Structures are given as C-alpha cells and as structure tokens.
Image (tube, rainbow, N blue to C red):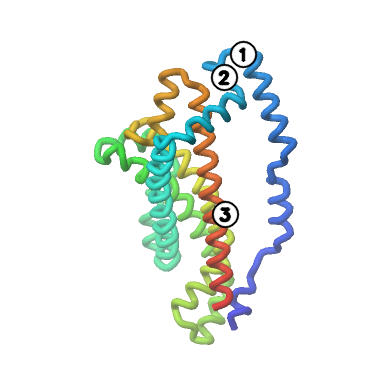
Amino acid sequence: MRSSITSRKPDPRPAARAANRDHIRPWAVALWLILWQAAAMAVGQDFLLASPVTVLVRFAALARTAAFWSAALFSMARILAGFLLGVLSGVAAAGLSLRWRRVRELLAPLHAVLRAIPVASFVIVALIWVPSRNLSVLISFLVVFPLIYAQTLGELERTDARCIEMARLFRMKPLRQLVYVYGLPALPALSDACASAMGMAWKSGVAAELISIPAGSIGERLYKAKVYLMTGDLFAWTLLIVLLSTLCARLLSLALKCAAARLERM
C-alpha cells in the first residue's frame, strides 16, 4: 500500500542534469578571482576595491576575535528563527488553503503584498513597532513565508488524485495520509524552496540589520566598515554571510533528506 501511494516520484535524470549544469567549477571560480585581483591591482587603492588576498587576510584576522563570532551567532540565531517561522507558517497556510477555499482567498491579497513590497519598506515600517535587535526575525519571516506558501501549495495541488482515492479506499489514518500521500511526494520541491528561501532570509535579514544597525550584529559591522571605508572588512563580513548562508542551506538539505529516508522506512 505504502509503495503504491509514494510511487509518484519525478524522473531523477532531468534534476541530475540541472544540478550538473549549476555545479560550480573550480576553473570558473579561479578565473573570477584572477579578474578580481587584476581589477584591484589596476585600481591600486584598497579602500576603493580590496583584492582577494586582502579580504582573506582580514577575514582570518577578524576570525581570531570573539566579536566576530559573537556577531555571527547574533545574526544567525535571529535569521534562522525568522526562516523557521516562515517555513512552518507557509507549510501550515498551504495545507489550510488546500483544504478550505476561503482560507486561500483570504491569504491571496496578503501573499501578493508580501511578494511585491521591497524589503527596505518592510524595515522602515516595522522599525516603528519592533526593536532593532529583533527586526531581522520579522523581516526574514516576511520574505520566507510567501515563497514557501506558494511553492508548497502548488506542489500539494499536484498530488495524484488516484493516491488520495486509494488512501480513502484503504481507510488510511489522516496522519498517515498527510505524511505519505501529501508530505513525501512534496518534500523534494519543498527542499528546493527552502534552499532558495534560506538565501533570501540571509539577504533580507542582513539588509534589515544594515538599516536598523542593532548593536553586535553583522549588519552593524558592515555599516561601520562602509562608514570608515574599510573595504577589506566589508568584503570579509560579506564572505562570512555567504559561508553561513551556504552552510545553513546544506545542513537543512541534509536534514530534510534524512527525514524523508526515515519516513520511507516507517
């Protein structure tokens, strides 16, 4: 029974080809670094354009300080909190919208507004009510929610009607229907959506910090680096954001794969 219901799996070959196309090649990275180095040497002023070597040196120097890791933990905790709230709320709202048409109609204007309004507008308005220390939580949530909601709802709507009918015919319990009929088939698409949402959460969360400047955050460090023309530090903090965003996305993908494998064995 379970194998019949969860048998709706996409052909892995197109996905594999797409992943192969999107794979970052070392030669491409090396070429861009060479071009960056050449541009920095042509400019000849580190405060205008820091070279890759300067950025790595500053990154290593900053990484030896407690303030560096304190700022990283400060921002990561709040951005991940907003991300998780956005994912859980988006999945729950998609499930309710699938079940009740009125819920979908109610959420349609909100979804459209959240997708259309720029992050800077959210930040400026939210600063009236939300302390700057927690603003990145709200902004990350507002950016992640519409993306997860739309992707999840679209995938749930593509659930095979034959699987639903089979589950009803065999009187499958509601929780098992939720997991095996809807959850497992939608998990690959949800994983892709979460990977995109993670990057958006970091971008919007740090942007919120850069505008609100909460003490002890990565956004504050970026702002100070910009004000004092410390371009090497500016690039070093940006490198940290890229590394943390990539690490969080990889760990999330691994966690979802482990969860899917465990559910398949149940």
Name the quadrant of the N terminus. bottom right
Tell me the residue that label 3 is attached to.
192
At horizontal 31% and vertical 39% (from top left) the residue drawn is: 133
Q: CA distance from mark 1 to mark 2?
A: 7 Å
**Sequence-first disc among 2 and 3:** 2
Query: Residue 39 sits in which quadrant?
Result: top right
At horizontal 49% and vertical 35% (from top left) the residue drawn is: 63
Marks 1 and 2 in Cβ contact (< 8 Å): yes
Q: Secondary structure at mark 2?
A: loop
Tell me the residue that label 1 is attached to.
43
Query: Residue 208 sits in which quadrant?
Result: top left
At horizontal 44% and vertical 22% (from top left) the residue drawn is: 226
**Sequence-first disc among 1 and 2:** 1
Q: CA distance from mark 1 to mark 3?
A: 40 Å
In the rendered image, the vertical position of residue 213 relative to residue 97, given as above or below: above
Q: Nearer the viewer, residue 48 or 111?
A: 48
- The image's mark for residue 49 is 2
What type is the residue that disc 2 sits on?
Answer: Leu
Mark 1, residues whose alpha carbon is within 10 Å: few (<14), some, or many (≥20)? some
Q: Secondary structure at mark 1?
A: helix
* Horizontal relation, residue 215 to residue 256: left or right: left
In the current view of this chain or complex, which residue is farthest to the bottom? 170
